[in-house]
Amino acid sequence: MFAADFEPAERDSRRRAPRAPVSLDISIGKTRRTLCKVVDISVNGARLQTYSALKRGTSIWLNLPRIGQVVADVMWADDYTAGCQFRTPLPIDMFEALVGEDAVT
């Protein structure tokens, strides 16, 4: 007898929009003093790698290239990785510009 793992053809995702892999060095905060990296992004949110731990439930300012400051809520945080949701979705043209210019291949 043997066993095998399988992966369903369709995944039930909670995401409202697909995320694109990127590598964006950005800063957090109005004063732009805290650095981090955006590793994936959608029009609704992003996953961050940080140098200081973030806490779930906090609101942060992200300073995104081409867009400027956006407010995001930290939805989850694990050590130095966090997922955040933008308070206002990014304009699709700005999102496409970020992904097109800085996409990871």
Image (spheres, rainbow, N blue to C red):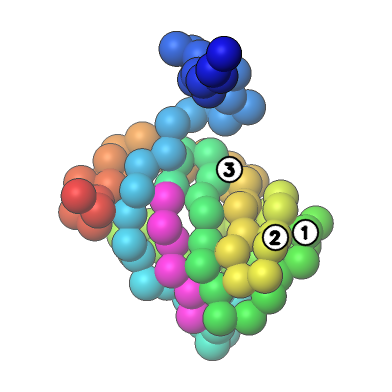
Q: Residue at x 48, y 74 (%)?
A: 36
Mark 2 secondary-structure assignment: strand
* Alpha carbon separation for disc pair 3 and 2: 20 Å
Q: Is residue 18 above or below residue 7?
A: below
Q: Is residue 35 above or below residue 73?
A: below
* Alpha carbon separation for disc pair 3 and 1: 18 Å
Task: Please provide the residue range marked out in magenta.
Answer: 35-40
Mark 3 secondary-structure assignment: loop
Of the image marks 3 and 1, the number of the one nearer the N terminus: 1
Please state which of residues 38 and 64 is positioned toward the viewer in this rendering. Answer: 38
Q: Is residue 70 left or right of residue 23?
A: right
Q: Is residue 88 left or right of residue 90?
A: right
The amino acid at mark 1 is Arg
Q: Which residue is mark 3?
A: 88
* Alpha carbon separation for disc pair 1 and 2: 6 Å
Q: Quadrant of residue 50?
A: bottom right
Magenta span dominant secondary structure: strand
- Front tag of 3 and 2: 2
Please state which of residues 91 and 58 is positioned toward the viewer in this rendering. Answer: 58
Q: Are marks 1 and 2 in contact (CB under 8 Å)?
A: yes
Q: Residue at x 45, y 12 (%)?
A: 9
Residue extending furthest toward the right = 57
Q: Which mark is residue 27?
A: none
Q: Is residue 100 above or below residue 55?
A: above
Q: Which mark is residue 77?
A: 2
Of the image marks 3 and 2, the number of the one nearer the N terminus: 2
User: What crowding class fits label 2: few (fewer than 14 Cα within 10 Å), some (14-19), or many (20 or more)?
Assistant: some
Q: Which residue is mark 1?
A: 56
User: What crowding class fits label 3: few (fewer than 14 Cα within 10 Å), some (14-19), or many (20 or more)?
Assistant: few
Q: Are marks 3 and 1 in contact (CB under 8 Å)?
A: no
> How far across and how far down the image is residue 51, in percent?
56, 81
Q: Is residue 26 above or below residue 57?
A: below
